Image (cartoon, rainbow, N blue to C red):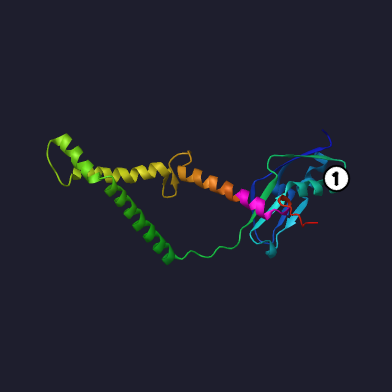
């Protein structure tokens, strides 16, 4: 136990360009007190322009570095076997004209989608039928139902996505956030398999 070092690789780490990455940045470490600070400051990688924006650090590379520095320790890796280093490149300023164009297209597209859906399911005829059943009168435009329904549609979207602008209604993740999480997991897995040279070996490799 005294000579055992436990490391748990982090899933994703964000760094700045040209930044030096140390072991404490990409992994949680449990070790003897005498070597703990040295392990934390162990240099792992130096970000360079050739790295682009994604770097994969494999746990085997980390184990080799630790055992080279401390040959007598027993390294035990727990959890993820790779860490994705995301280099946060300088973002371009937001173009408000482009933002307005995109917002306008999304607004018009959403409105047309909702109207087409209501037309497909004959929502106006349903409202007319419900209005007749409640009041006993025929009405071509039952605004008494249509106006509350329109407000309820917007409120339902807010509750469904669990956001009102940037404010979260409660701590429960929305369906969109869950889908984005699944997409991020699939994207991370793809990056790990394709960017990590240790994950693939071809017949013509030495």
Total numbered badges shown on the rendered structure: 1
The C terminus: image quadrant:
bottom right
Q: Residue furthest front?
A: 203
Which residue occupies 25% across, 44% down? 123
Which residue occupies 68% across, 61% down? 51
Q: Residue furthest right?
A: 72
Q: Quadrant of residue 121?
A: top left
Magenta includes 47?
no
The N terminus: image quadrant:
top right
Disc 1 secondary structure class: loop
Overall secondary structure of the magenta section:
helix
Q: Position of residue 62 (x, y in %)?
A: 77, 48
Query: Which residues make up the magenta segment?
Result: 188-197
Q: Position of residue 70 (x, y in %)?
A: 85, 45
Which residue occupies 68% across, 65% down? 49
Q: Residue furthest top?
A: 1
Magenta includes 194?
yes
Mark 1 highlights which residue? 70
Q: Is residue 56 above or below residue 153?
A: below
In the image, 13 versus 24, the foreground residue is 13
Q: Is residue 152 above or below residue 84?
A: above
In this picture, residue 24 sits left or right of residue 187: right
In this picture, residue 176 sits left or right of residue 77: left
In the image, 26 versus 127, the foreground residue is 127
Tell me, yes or no, if residue 115 can be seen here. Answer: yes
Q: Position of residue 77 (x, y in %)?
A: 74, 40
Q: Residues within 10 Å of mark 1 (few under 14, many from 20)?
A: some
Q: Quadrant of residue 9?
A: top right
Tell me, yes or no, if residue 30 can be seen here. Answer: no
Q: Quadrant of residue 99?
A: bottom left
């Amino acid at each position: 136990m005294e000579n055992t070092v436990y490391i748990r690789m982090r899933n994703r780490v964000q760094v700045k360009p040209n930044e030096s990455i140390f072991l404490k940045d990409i992994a949680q470490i449990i070790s003897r007190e005498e070597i703990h600070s040295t392990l934390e400051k162990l240099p792992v990688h130096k970000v360079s322009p050739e790295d682009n924006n994604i770097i994969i650090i494999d746990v085997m590379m980390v184990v080799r570095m630790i055992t080279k520095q401390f040959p007598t320790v027993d390294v035990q890796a727990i959890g993820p076997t790779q860490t994705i280093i995301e280099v946060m490149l300088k973002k371009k300023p937001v173009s408000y004209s482009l933002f307005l164009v995109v917002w306008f297209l999304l607004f018009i597209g959403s409105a047309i989608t909702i109207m087409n859906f209501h037309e497909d399911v004959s929502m106006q005829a349903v409202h007319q039928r419900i209005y007749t059943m409640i009041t006993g009168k025929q009405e071509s435009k039952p605004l008494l139902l249509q106006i509350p329904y329109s407000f309820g549609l917007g409120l339902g979207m807010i509750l469904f996505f669990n956001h009102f602008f940037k404010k979260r209604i409660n701590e429960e993740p929305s369906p969109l956030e869950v889908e984005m999480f699944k997409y991020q997991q699939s994207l991370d897995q793809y990056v790990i398999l394709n960017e990590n040279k240790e994950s693939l070996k071809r017949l013509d490799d030495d």
